[in-house]
């Protein structure tokens, strides 16, 4: 069995220690070039864990070991384009969801899909777009429309932002949510035009009130009636409009085209994705992201953009490593995936809602702010208590997660070796050496008192590991 | 100096390292979390009580001296000799004897005729307006207290500023753009649970955050360590309070009273919560919505409200905490002056707001709404509800109401602060 020792920490940070690497990272050409491990920047468990936290929702022990054997680029290949039949998997889940009937059931199905999918990056990006378009079931109040909405997000999550945006502009859930389900010629409705030109694309400050008003005229004629999209030609304003410097008898499709032609759109999205996949603690320099912005603006190919980011030297550097806070879904599913179990996601959906991430119900049009906002006294106690519920072996989650069984499966025969495995599994051993030692010793002491059973001891140790501050870092 | 740091850790901490405080804690954390006085004594607390369904203000704060009252309320009129008279016109409902005592002690103020222009008569619409504090924008996506919590967020202080206490879904008033506002049913939801099986004489290593890490220059990790420490400390405080005061304070056996007991314990635990939101009436179209046979039901609700608030005030006063606390009630609307032929009343407009606490000027505030000059059959408003909000935000909590309410409403001069 391959067990990385706790001495690895620090190696991955050599990028920071070495001034030449820090310097090279500020050159866009080098920063976005594909990472090839070398002596200074070795491919190790910590890097593999980092990749699986960002491009998936954590990893199992086998996945980490496979990644070590495959090397970074081949692992990224698999995450981007898994060999398994993802189409069949997703079609089956689409069918389950169709018969779900309630938003609560949809939440549970999505979490189950996130846990079981052969293509976790697709779900990671669907979650990203869910927060970006931020459509809330609380306002839409229609499970079928919400299911179709998230299905739209998933269908384009790694495809074309242009097609995604076109879909959004015809999506009944989005229009109902924004109060844009009626677009009369006489009373143009700005409720969709405004977010389309601000939150969804250009970001704040790139269009005028007049642009919004004119764009609203282009959307006249579109209605949602009984949950279905309808176009009523006589309610469409066919006159000339002036939008972002262009003039013409524009329709809704033209508005989508025009906002996509603005350089601000690609820039806003690249920045947002940078925060999601690479780093939330610092904003990138304009110069650094310029090549990505330019390339994304050409074809709005999301897969290509994600691929560039995930393969890059920058992604595998100290700029990105541990520079994000896990959202509640990442926190919980990270535990579940690490322990190779399937749990009740109905319960999990509710527990995650209490931690601030109620799937299908983003708080506002800005989606989940996340970052440090995920963390406060109550949510940290909540995360601790969720970890207890997941790991205790009884109660609402039952005994589906069993860290001792997982350790034995991976050839650990004593609680002590199990403890080392869990530290590597969940933190890749990347813990301050003194903390590492002390945590291990505490585990041993706990085991020796009262002749405790190894399963209980390993469960408690797993809980200690996933409630360390380090585990909240993505 | 005889030890390396590693030896020091070994010698001092041993196996129970993780369950003891102090030595392993980085100094900056000790100072900020444990060693210094917990927080500013002047930190005030606001407790909001939502009365769901539309409380009949006229049978709560009763204008018995106005002939129009008796004329319009042929079956619902409350006998004036049973009222708790405030002056020659106004009296409190007969079962609100506890509120009358608070009023006499100066711990209760009544703001009359609170509302807003063009009153919304649907439960959802009106409640949404009270929650968003923005009657002009029905699509407003945040609540006033959620915005208040956002406005005081500070990455170095990870106490949660606002909490909902109750068994229903979190009311929209607490909806924030950025911060996570927790909903709790009991103190247990804010206490760190333990994994089963720890030997009784050993506490759990739940304070692993206290272990010293070599500085890695990761500020996010520092933040998480600091937050975890703070969360553990807060959890311990709540646990201690729960144990110490579980049964000492006397509360009546109403659900609302139990909620107030929880709030009082959290105030006592002093964990930095500035805003508590509670609900009475069951949420949705709540218990105060009495279109038929109003008298008995309304009577029971007002009795529970008044007894529960009084118990809360008594509890806080005993612990000298009342001066830090202000409680405020609201309902989505009042009700029509004229009863509706089914011994009930219909949806109205303005209604009284009760304030309770240790720093009130007391008395009746604002003019008494006329019973003849009406807004669609119901008393008109004289005081915009956002002036009450501005008062509690600016004058009581020390927040900036202009940011929360988007413009400056004139606070009322009702507090001794």
Image (cartoon, coloured by chain):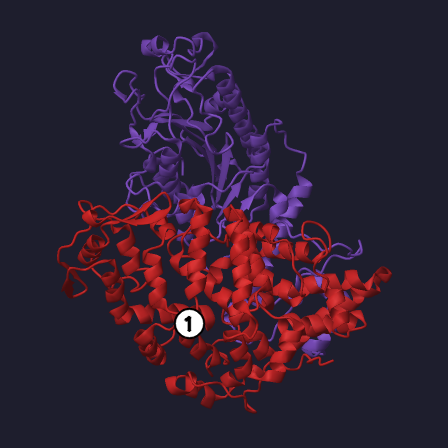
Chain colours: A red, B purple
Residue A327 seen: no
Q: Quadrant of residue B363?
A: top left
Q: Quadrant of the N terminus of chain B?
A: bottom right
Judging depth in this view, the residue of A246 and B204 nearest the camera is: A246
Say whether residue B197 is left or right of residue B265.
right
Tell me where residue A307 appears, x and y as whole percent.
45, 77
Q: Does residue A152 sit above or below A407 in this rendering?
A: above
Tell me where residue A224 appears, x and y as whole percent.
32, 47
Which residue is at a point 27% across and 55% down the rendered structure image?
A194
Task: Determine the secondary structure under disc 1.
Answer: helix
Q: Quadrant of the C terminus of chain B?
A: top left
Read off the residue under disc 1.
Answer: A274
Q: Does residue B160 sit above or below A87 in this rendering?
A: above
Q: Quadrant of residue A403?
A: bottom right
Q: Does residue A381 sit above or below B138 in this rendering?
A: below
Say whether residue A205 is left or right of residue A120.
left
Say whether residue B112 is left or right of residue A345.
left
Count of numbered circles in the view: 1
Tell me where residue B150 appears, x and y as whole percent.
41, 52
Which residue is at a point 64% across and 45% down the rendered structure image?
B188
Circle 1 Cα neighbour tier, 10 Å, few/some/many (<14 / 14–19 / ≥20):
many
Which residue is at a point 42% across and 59% down the rendered structure image?
A152
Query: In which chain is the residue bearing label 1?
Result: A
Judging depth in this view, the residue of A290 and B308 nearest the camera is: A290
Judging depth in this view, the residue of B158 and B316 nearest the camera is: B158
Residue A334 seen: yes
Q: Quadrant of residue B380?
A: top left
Q: Does residue A360 sit above or below B339 in this rendering?
A: below
């Amino acid at each position: 069995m391959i067990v990385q020792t706790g001495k690895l920490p620090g190696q991955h940070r050599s990028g920071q220690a070495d001034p030449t690497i820090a310097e090279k990272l500020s050159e866009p050409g080098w920063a976005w070039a594909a990472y090839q491990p070398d002596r200074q920047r070795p491919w190790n468990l910590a890097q593999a864990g980092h990749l699986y936290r960002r491009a998936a929702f954590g990893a199992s022990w086998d996945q980490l070991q496979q990644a070590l054997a495959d090397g970074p680029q081949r692992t990224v290949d698999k995450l981007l384009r898994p060999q398994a039949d993802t189409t069949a998997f997703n079609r089956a889940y689409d069918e389950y969801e169709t018969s779900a009937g309630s938003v609560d059931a949809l939440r549970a199905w999505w979490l189950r899909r996130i846990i079981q999918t052969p293509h976790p990056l697709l779900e990671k990006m669907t979650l990203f777009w869910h927060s970006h378009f931020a459509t809330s079931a609380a306002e839409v109040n229609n499970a079928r429309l919400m299911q179709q909405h998230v299905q739209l997000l998933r269908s384009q999550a790694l495809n074309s932002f242009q097609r995604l945006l076109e879909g959004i502009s015809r999506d009944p859930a989005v229009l109902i949510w924004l109060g844009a389900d009626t677009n009369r010629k006489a009373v143009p409705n700005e409720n969709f035009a405004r977010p389309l030109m601000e939150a969804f694309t250009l970001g704040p400050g790139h269009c005028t009130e007049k642009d919004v008003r004119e764009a609203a005229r282009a959307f006249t004629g579109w209605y949602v009636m009984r949950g279905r999209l309808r176009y009523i030609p006589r309610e469409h304003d066919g006159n000339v409009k002036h939008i972002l410097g262009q003039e013409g008898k524009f329709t809704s499709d033209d508005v989508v085209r025009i906002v996509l032609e603005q350089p601000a759109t690609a820039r806003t999205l690249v920045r947002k994705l940078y925060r999601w996949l690479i780093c939330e603690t610092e904003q990138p320099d304009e110069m650094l992201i310029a090549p990505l912005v330019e390339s994304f603006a050409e074809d709005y190919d999301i897969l290509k953009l994600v691929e560039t980011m995930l393969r890059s030297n920058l992604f595998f550097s100290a700029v990105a490593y541990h520079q994000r806070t896990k959202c509640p879904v990442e926190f919980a599913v990270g535990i579940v995936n690490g322990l190779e179990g399937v749990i009740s996601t109905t319960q999990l959906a509710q527990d995650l809602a209490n931690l601030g991430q109620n799937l299908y119900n983003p708080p506002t049009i800005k989606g989940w702010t996340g970052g440090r906002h995920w963390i406060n006294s109550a949510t940290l106690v909540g995360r601790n208590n969720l970890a207890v519920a997941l790991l205790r072996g009884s109660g609402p989650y039952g005994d589906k997660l069993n860290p001792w069984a997982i350790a034995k499966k991976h050839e650990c025969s004593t609680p002590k070796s199990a403890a080392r495995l869990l530290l590597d599994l969940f933190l890749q051993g990347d813990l301050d050496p003194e903390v590492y030692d002390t945590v291990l010793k505490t585990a041993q002491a706990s085991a020796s008192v009262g002749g405790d059973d190894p399963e209980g001891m390993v469960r408690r140790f797993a809980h200690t590991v996933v409630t360390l501050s380090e585990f909240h870092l993505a | 100096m005889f030890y390396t740091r590693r030896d020091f850790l070994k010698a001092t901490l041993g196996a129970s390292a993780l369950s003891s405080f102090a030595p392993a804690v980085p100094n900056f954390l000790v100072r900020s979390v444990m060693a210094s006085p917990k927080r500013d004594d002047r930190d005030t607390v606001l407790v909001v009580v939502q009365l769901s369904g539309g409380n009949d203000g006229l049978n709560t704060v009763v204008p018995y001296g106005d002939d129009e009252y008796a004329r319009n309320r042929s079956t619902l009129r409350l006998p004036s000799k049973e009222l708790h008279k405030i002056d020659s016109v106004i009296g409190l409902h007969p079962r609100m004897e506890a509120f009358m005592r608070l009023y006499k002690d100066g711990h209760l103020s009544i703001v009359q005729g609170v509302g807003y222009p063009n009153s919304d008569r649907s439960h959802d619409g009106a409640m949404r307006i009270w929650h968003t504090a923005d009657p002009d924008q029905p699509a407003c996506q945040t609540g006033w207290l959620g915005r208040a919590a956002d406005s005081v967020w500070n990455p170095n202080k990870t106490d949660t500023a606002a909490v909902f206490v109750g068994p229903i879904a979190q009311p929209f008033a607490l909806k924030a753009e950025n911060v996570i506002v927790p909903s709790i049913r009991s103190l247990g939801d804010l206490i760190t649970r333990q994994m089963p099986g720890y030997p009784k004489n050993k506490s759990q290593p739940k304070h692993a955050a206290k272990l010293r890490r070599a500085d890695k220059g990761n500020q996010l990790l520092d933040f998480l360590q600091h937050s975890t420490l703070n969360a553990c400390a807060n959890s311990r405080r709540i646990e201690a309070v729960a144990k110490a005061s579980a049964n000492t304070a006397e509360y009546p056996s109403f659900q609302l009273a139990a909620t107030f007991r929880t709030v009082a314990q959290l105030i006592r635990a002093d964990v930095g919560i500035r805003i508590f939101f509670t609900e009475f009436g069951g949420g949705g179209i709540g218990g105060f919505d009495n279109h038929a046979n109003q008298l008995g039901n309304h009577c029971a609700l007002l009795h529970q409200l008044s007894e529960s608030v009084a118990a809360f005030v008594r509890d806080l006063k005993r612990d000298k905490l009342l001066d830090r606390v202000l409680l405020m009630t609201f309902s989505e609307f009042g009700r029509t002056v004229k009863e509706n032929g089914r011994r009930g009343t219909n949806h109205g407009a303005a209604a009284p707001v009760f304030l309770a606490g240790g720093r009130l000027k007391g008395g009746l505030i604002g003019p008494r709404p006329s019973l003849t000059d009406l807004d669609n059959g119901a008393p008109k408003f004289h005081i915009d509800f956002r002036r009450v909000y501005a008062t509690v935000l600016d004058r009581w909590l020390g927040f900036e109401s202009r940011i929360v309410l988007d413009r400056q409403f004139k606070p009322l001069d009702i507090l001794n602060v």
